[in-house]
Amino acid sequence: MTIFYFTLKRSFANLANLIFLTAAPIACIFLPAGEGWPPLAYGYAYFGIVILFVAIRLAQIMMEDRVKGILKRLSVAPVRYFSYLGQHLLAYAVILILQSAVVVLGGWIAGQELHRPWALFALYVSFSFAALAMALAWISVFRSKDAAFLFYMSLIVLAALLGGIILPLEIFPDLLRRIAVILPTFWFAEGLKSIASAQPFADNVRINATLCLYALVFLVLGSTRRMQ
Amino acid sequence: MTLASMQSVLKRYGSCAALDYIDLEIHEGEIVGLLGPNGAGKTTLIQALTGILPVDQGRISLFGDSRNPFSDANKQKLGLVTQEIAVFEELTAKEGLEFFAGIYGLRREEKKKRVAEALEFVGLSAYANKVPHKFSGGMKRRLNIACALTHRPRLLIMDEPTVGIDPQSRNHILESVQKLREQGTTILYTTHCMEEVQEIASRVVILDQGQVVKEGTVQQLIETVRHEETIIFDVADPLGIPLRQVESIAGVSQVSVSGSRITVISAAGAGNLDRILSVVQQHSGVLGIQADKPNLEDVFLTLTGKQLRDREGSR
Ligand SMILES: Nc1ncnc2c1ncn2[C@@H]1O[C@H](COP(=O)(O)OP(=O)(O)OP(=O)(O)O)[C@@H](O)[C@H]1O
Ligand SMILES: [Mg+2]
């Protein structure tokens, strides 16, 4: 588990990451609730954006390994590429799951109305998996770290907007709303709605399963392209 | 014993053969100097030999195994110093080395010991807890080397480990390489610098345009040009010299320009110095003349028609 351990270490090594991994989720806990929208307090919708952002920041570590030639070093060492990839993804997943736990637990302690904290936690975790897989697929097609990051940032904002995380979907024209269904961010927003309006348990499961399916598809896309 | 070998290895990029049917053997205890100008195919050769790059044709064998040369057991005995500096910028020098020691299966005390050893070896002990972000180019290069040492490879492959660094770091690296050999490590050392090869290599392989153009000990290679001599003119107007005319003088085999120097290779004892001089003088002032014993540089020039370092003026 050498790779896993050092991936955790590297994830927290630079200041910008440290702030995003700690300050952003904490800020999410304390944002106020809106009037009628979003379904939970603002921070609990915006945390979806934090997840997307953190996922790409973390995945960039792997991109750096590829660009700088560290992957070449690893490919002459007795380690499999899939072990490298697996241990990285595991480390990232652990970080994102911990963040989700902090946000849900923190909100519960701070007295936010979370309706069903467990379902909320599950939603964050599924969405984290989808976000990680998307980030992986994204970096696998780019050669420059900065280009990959900037471009992805704009996509995140756009997807969050069209998916209904930043603004209620109802204000968009019908066509856009129909397109939104293909975005993972749409399912994230759906999940929040479902939790807030006490939909049956099966509804939550369906939404989480959809997000995990996204995760799977992007994981396959991102990992079949060997990053040499 | 032969630790690594290539037999008629071909690697193409599009229509250009980066490795053009290469044959190569590395024997235990050698420092093989792989010498070639930019783009000769040195890195490609190393990547093929270490399994990073699949080849189009040919046979590669490591530690006597040609059926599965890149097995984990073989990888465990192999060390690679990459041409690009591949170290972790955000980890301290020590942590970075612990990572590499760890993936080679070293644990706890053993790992600590080997990491400390490797740092000591490249002279970075004092910087163990600093991040390479702030290191000088030479220090990064040294760390880059240390990353390949913690598992004590039997065969160490170094791709231009001294490129772009200060003379002090360079001497340190050259000494380290020799020390490694004394400790029993076999080394393939890639460079485009003559002096380095002359200093440390027990055997030299000259690579140009994807082909091995010559190999042997430094002495053997120099033997091949023994019957030649090199005359270097320092001139005021190097571009004014009609190179073709100089080349046509009996005995002259090569003429090249580099900066203000005209290098003429001629058969030894041809007695043509006065004729060469008069042609040169007709077209430019001559500031100095120097006749050299043949060295590796001349071997290279004779073999490839190129000067290894200052190639901008060669014809
Ligand atoms: N990925 C690639 N795609 C296409 N051509 C390549 C690629 N890599 C190398 N080449 C070509 O193969 C030839 C050999 O390149 P290589 O990098 O092995 O040379 P080198 O001897 O290591 O040079 P240098 O001293 O610059 O490191 C060059 O002509 C180069 O342009
Ligand atoms: Mg090279």
Image: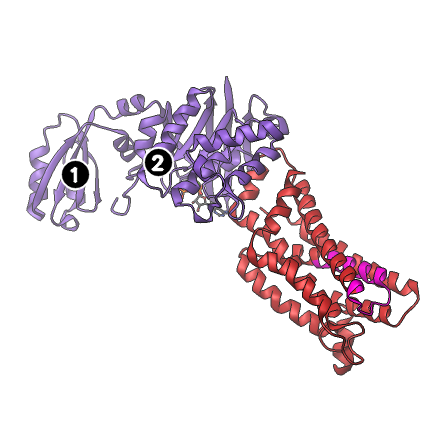
Residue B55 % position (x, y): 55, 37
Chain A: what color? Answer: red
Image quadrant containing the C terminus of chain B = top left
Who's purple, chain-wise? B
- Residue position marked by numbered label 2 in the rendering: B170
Main SS of the magenta segment? Answer: helix
Three-letter amino acid code of the residue under disc 1: Ser
Foreground: B186 or A170?
Answer: A170
SS under mark 2: helix
**Magenta region includes residue A83:** no
**Magenta region includes residue A121:** yes
Q: Which mark is residue B248?
A: 1
> Can you say whether B159 is above or below B88 in the image?
above
| Residue at (28, 44) in percent of width and height | B311
Which region shows up in magenta? Answer: A108-131
Residue B273 % position (x, y): 9, 33
